[in-house]
Amino acid sequence: MERVYRQFVLEGTPVYCQPYGHGHINNTYLLLTDMPHAYILQKINTHVFEDVPGLMANIIAVTEHLRRQDPDPRHVLTLVETVDGKPYLTTEEGEYWRMYEFVTSSVCLELPESAQDMRRAGEAFGRFQKQLADFPAETLNVTIPQFHDTPNRYEQLRQAIRENRAGRLHEVQYELSFFMLRAEEAGMIQQMLARGELPLRVTHNDTKLDNVMLDRTLHLPLCIIDLDTVMPGLSVTDFGDAIRGGASTCAEDEQDLSKVSLSLDLFEAYADGYLSTCGTSLTRNEIETLALGAKTITLECGVRFLTDYLNGDVYFHTDRPGQNLDRCRTQMKLVQDMEEKWNSMQQIIRMAAR
Ligand code: ADP
Ligand code: GN1
Ligand code: MG
């Protein structure tokens, strides 16, 4: 790792550099020096992101835009330059590395420790979206085409079924029927977009709870991280993705499905926080589609985990066999629970939007 971090302008002498965090995509390392200064070093996943210069151009433009509105260094990601004055490193082997200042005295949570944490996360993502409302969307590069086009994700699943690359098809008949039975509903949001009923906005597109940094002691929101997928997208899927992860009672890869459910308290807390910061800028259709956003993105994510399981675990990082199938099954259980709690979810949104 030394050959990599030596290429960045650091304060102090590095004393520690080890894998860090729970991200499924990039390889992330925490770098400590002998000064009170920490860094996040990341090898960007070029299998997932084909146009890294385009992705980095987005991040530079978006963080500059955010910084103009709020210059507090703990409130916006800060890239560390290379010794050649570049915003990221390209190695001879074709690897791409970038370094961020570690957001000081911060934590990020995989699951909220309280409803208040969930409310704060909602406020943070709502504010983020609002701050990007006047960002020129047409200047953004599309880092993953059709990222949240759910029917396209179903098409990728059908392809994985046809190819059966890992020979696992016979294990997942129940899972396949579960998703296929819901294919039509899963396409409704894309149809609304096509009919002009939902506006395209600059969105984050990966609003997992562990992509929000909170102050370590007060748990107040500091900044939004993981900006690789900031692109034109839909508010309702940004809302939904946060619910999928954060309002679940369990970790994404929980094996005991009896423990997995949607917490309506956490759902309400996020909806309250989110609508308090960006509710006035959402259209009526968007507000009415928030619950469907949660269900759609949960179905979509389940489909993606299942596709990756069938393809032999080539997309999401895994650290044990069967993990993608476990992740798929928690998403199914969440969808089922949302179906049971559908009326309450709608009612909560109506109340939060008042
Ligand atoms: P991935 O795309 O793999 O999810 P992330 O950019 O989300 O990668 O980073 C993975 C983890 O590293 C985060 O969940 C967080 O714990 C930590 N992290 C990333 N950037 C920072 C930062 N600037 N300051 C503190 N922690 C960070
Ligand atoms: C990935 O990068 P990370 O771990 O925050 C994925 C998301 C999925 C999520 C599921 C670029 O998010 O779309 O919802 O895993 N990111 C990408 O946990 O594919
Ligand atoms: Mg992440």
Image (tube, rainbow, N blue to C red):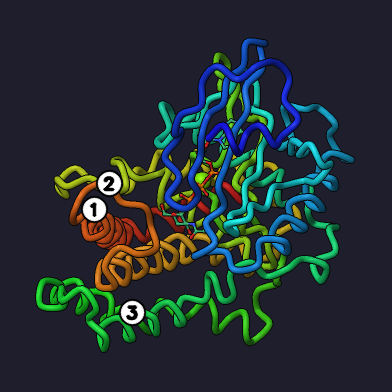
Mark 2–mark 3 distance (CA, rounded to whole Å): 22 Å
x and y, in percent, of residue 152 in the image: 46, 81
Residue 180 is at least partly visible in this image? yes
Quarter assignment of residue 238? bottom right
**Numbered disc 2: secondary structure:** loop
Quarter assignment of residue 103? top right
**108, above or below 354, in the image:** above
x and y, in percent, of residue 261 in the image: 27, 48
Write down which quadrant ligand 1 falls in: top right
Q: Which mark is residue 323?
A: 1
Q: Residues within 10 Å of mark 3 (few under 14, many from 20)?
A: many
Between circles 2 and 3, the one closer to the viewer is 2
Q: Residue at x 64, y 40 (%)?
A: 224
**298, above or below 18, in the image:** below
- Out of 207 and 61, give the one closest to the viewer: 61
Q: Is mark 3 within 8 Å of ligand 2?
A: no
- Out of 241 and 10, give the one closest to the viewer: 10
Q: Which residue is mark 3?
A: 157
Q: Earlier in the sequence, mark 3 or mark 1?
A: 3
Tag 1 and tag 2, C-beta contact below 8 Å: yes
- Out of 36 and 175, give the one closest to the viewer: 36
**Numbered disc 1: secondary structure:** helix
Mark 1–mark 2 distance (CA, rounded to whole Å): 7 Å
190 displayed left or right of 79: left
Q: Which residue is mark 2?
A: 319
Mark 3–mark 1 distance (CA, rounded to whole Å): 17 Å
Q: Residue at x 19, y 56 (%)?
A: 322
Residue 350 is at least partly visible in this image? no
